[in-house]
Image (spheres, rainbow, N blue to C red):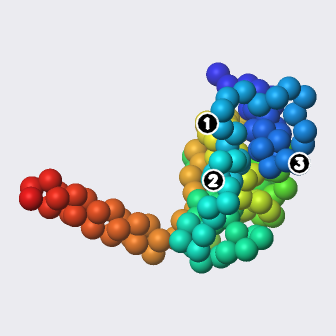
């Protein structure tokens, strides 16, 4: 069984480690290893190599890697107990970071929960930490599952790109 406090402590540890990597918090002990990896996916070694190609077109002081741009801010929550309310779910997510909105999808006629919903965080890093640390967290006896809330069009586009890649790789292997 997972302990709720252990997950909260782990989430806070991840946030502190990211803050240390960004230089917001000074570590007590020096970092171990040759290369220090910055939270945004840019290592200290190649920090200056931020270009239009790897930022999706944004170059300048606020430029970040494509992975940061694609980080989820909204999560899809499923396997929610049918009697659970937003108030039952919010403490777990608020322990990770500030929540803009939590919505449980309900049946329009009966008003009963459909067992799934969405949570939106103010920062993508909080959503990423929640995705890692709250997977399987029990609310009213049921373990919740989390996933990125992506649109159907985006999923179709990703599937199309993946299929094209696999087709090129198969052709390359044959010839």
- Residue 4 visible in the snapshot: no
Left or right of residue 155, residue 151 in this image: right
Left or right of residue 123, residue 1 in this image: left
Marks 3 and 2, Cα distance to the nearest angstrom?
A: 20 Å
Left or right of residue 45, residue 26 in this image: right
Pinpoint residue 27: horizontal percent, then vertical percent.
87, 34
Quadrant of residue 166 within the rendered picture: bottom left
For label 3, the residue is 24
For label 2, the residue is 46
Does dot 2 land on a helix, a strand or a loop? loop
Pinpoint residue 71: horizontal percent, then vertical percent.
63, 59
> Mark 3 packing: few (<14 Cα in 10 Å), some, or many (20+)?
few
Q: Identify the mark nearer the N-term, 1 or 2.
A: 2
Q: Identify the mark nearer the N-term, 3 or 2.
A: 3
For label 1, the residue is 136
Marks 1 and 2, Cα distance to the nearest angstrom?
A: 36 Å
């Amino acid at each position: 069984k997972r302990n709720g406090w252990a997950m909260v402590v782990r989430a806070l540890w991840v946030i502190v480690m990211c803050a240390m990597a960004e230089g917001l918090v000074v570590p007590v002990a020096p970092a171990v290893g040759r290369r220090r990896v910055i939270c945004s996916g840019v290592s200290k070694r190649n920090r200056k190599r931020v270009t239009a190609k790897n930022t999706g077109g944004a170059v300048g002081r606020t430029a970040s890697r494509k992975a940061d741009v694609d980080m989820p801010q909204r999560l899809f929550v499923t396997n929610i107990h049918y009697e659970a309310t937003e108030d039952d779910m919010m403490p777990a997510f608020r322990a990770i970071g500030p929540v803009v909105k939590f919505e449980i999808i309900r049946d329009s006629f009966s008003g009963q929960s459909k067992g799934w919903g969405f949570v939106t965080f103010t920062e993508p890093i909080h959503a990423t930490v929640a995705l890692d640390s709250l997977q399987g967290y029990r609310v009213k006896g049921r373990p919740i599952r989390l996933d990125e809330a992506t649109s159907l069009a985006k999923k179709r586009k990703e599937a199309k790109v993946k299929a094209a890649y696999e087709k090129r790789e198969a052709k390359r292997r044959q010839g």
